[in-house]
Amino acid sequence: MGRSKPVANIFLDTNILKFSAVKKHVYRKKSKMVTWGDATFEVECHEPYTVNKIHKIKSEVQRRDALFLAMLAYAGHDKWLKFHIHREVDLETWGLPGMASPSGRFFDCEIHEVPDPVAPQSRIIIGGNKRFKDHTLDFVCNMKHPRYVELTKMTGAYQGEAKPLNLNQALDAYHIWCAESAKMDYFLTMDDKLKKLIEKSKIKTNVSIATPDQLLRSMVPKFGLWGAIKYMWKGYRFAKPRVGFDEGQGWR
C-alpha cells in the first residue's frame, strides 16, 4: 500500500530561497584587439557567462546543504512534501542579488502561503523618509503578542527592554511563529547559528528546526521503500543539471 502524500508540511526560511537561486546569467567584460585598416586597437566587450553560485559558498556544510535543496524541491514537485512561506518572506527577498535565477524560484517548486498568525498587522513598506529595513524593524518591534515575545527570546532577538530587537533574529522569530500557527511540521533553514540558539533555549517550539541535510534524512524513510528508491533516482536526475552545471561562456 502506497504512502499518502504529502508526508510533511515545510516552512521555508528566507535563506532557502536565496541559496536555491544557484544559476546566474551575467555579462563579463573582456578585452579584445581589433584591426581596422592599418590601425590595431583594444576594445572592451561583454560576453554572456553562466555562473554557479554554489562554488562561491565558503562553508563546506552550507555548500553541501545548498546541493540538497534541489533534491528537496523535487520532493515538492512529486508531492511528497508541501512547502510554505509567509508573505513577509517574499518581502525579505526584495533586492537580494541573484534572486531572479534561471533555475526558477526554489527550482520552480510550488510554494503555498500561510496566513498571518493573528489578525493582519499594520505594515508600512515604503515612504515616510525611511528605508525598507527601518519599516521592517518598526513592524517587528511593535508586535507585542506574548508568544511572539517568547520566540524573540528563543531566537536571540531580544536584547533587553531598553534596546530594539535584532532585526534578522526578530524576523526568524516571526517566521517560526507563522509556522507554528499554520501547524507546520518543519522549519527549513540554512542558518546553523539560529538552529543552535534554538536548541540551547529553554523556550521550545513544536515545529522541528532542520537543515536541508537533516530534513532529507528524516523524510526519505517516510516515503516507503519503493517510494524512496524512485525518489532518490528521479530526484538525483532532477537536481544534477540544476546544481551541478559547469560555469562557462554562454547562457546555459
Image (spheres, rainbow, N blue to C red):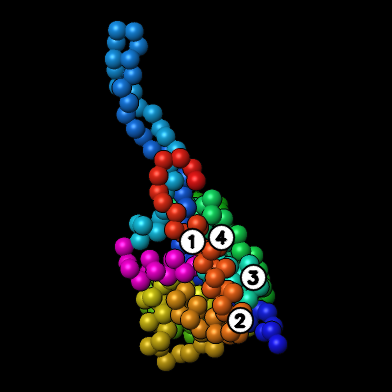
Front residue of 133/113: it is: 113
**Range shown magenta:** 58-70
Counting residues from the start of the chain, the first of labels 4 and 2 encountered is 4
Counting residues from the start of the chain, the first of labels 1 and 4 encountered is 4
User: Marks 1/3: CA distance?
Assistant: 16 Å
For the residues bearing labels 1 and 2, Cβ distance under 8 angstroms: no
x 50%, y 46%: residue: 252
Identity of the amino acid at label 1?
Answer: Lys
Q: Dividing the picture into quarters, in which one does residue 27 lie?
A: top left
Identity of the amino acid at label 4?
Answer: Phe
Say which element carries label 2. helix
Which numbered tag is attached to residue 226? 2
Counting residues from the start of the chain, the first of labels 1 and 2 encountered is 2
Q: Is residue 21 visible?
A: no
- What residue did someone put label 4 on? 107
Front residue of 214/125: it is: 214
Q: Is the magenta stretch mostly helix, strand or loop?
A: helix
x 42%, y 34%: residue: 47
Q: Can residue 68 be seen in this view?
A: yes
Counting residues from the start of the chain, the first of labels 2 and 3 encountered is 3
Provide residue 21's location: percent of width, then percent of height: 49, 57
Counting residues from the start of the chain, the first of labels 4 and 3 encountered is 3
- Position of 137 with respect to 28 (left or right) is right
Identity of the amino acid at label 3?
Answer: Asp
Say which element carries label 4. loop
Which numbered tag is attached to residue 78? 3
Which numbered tag is attached to residue 240? 1
Q: Nearer the viewer, mark 2 or mark 3?
A: 2
User: Marks 4/3: CA distance?
Assistant: 13 Å
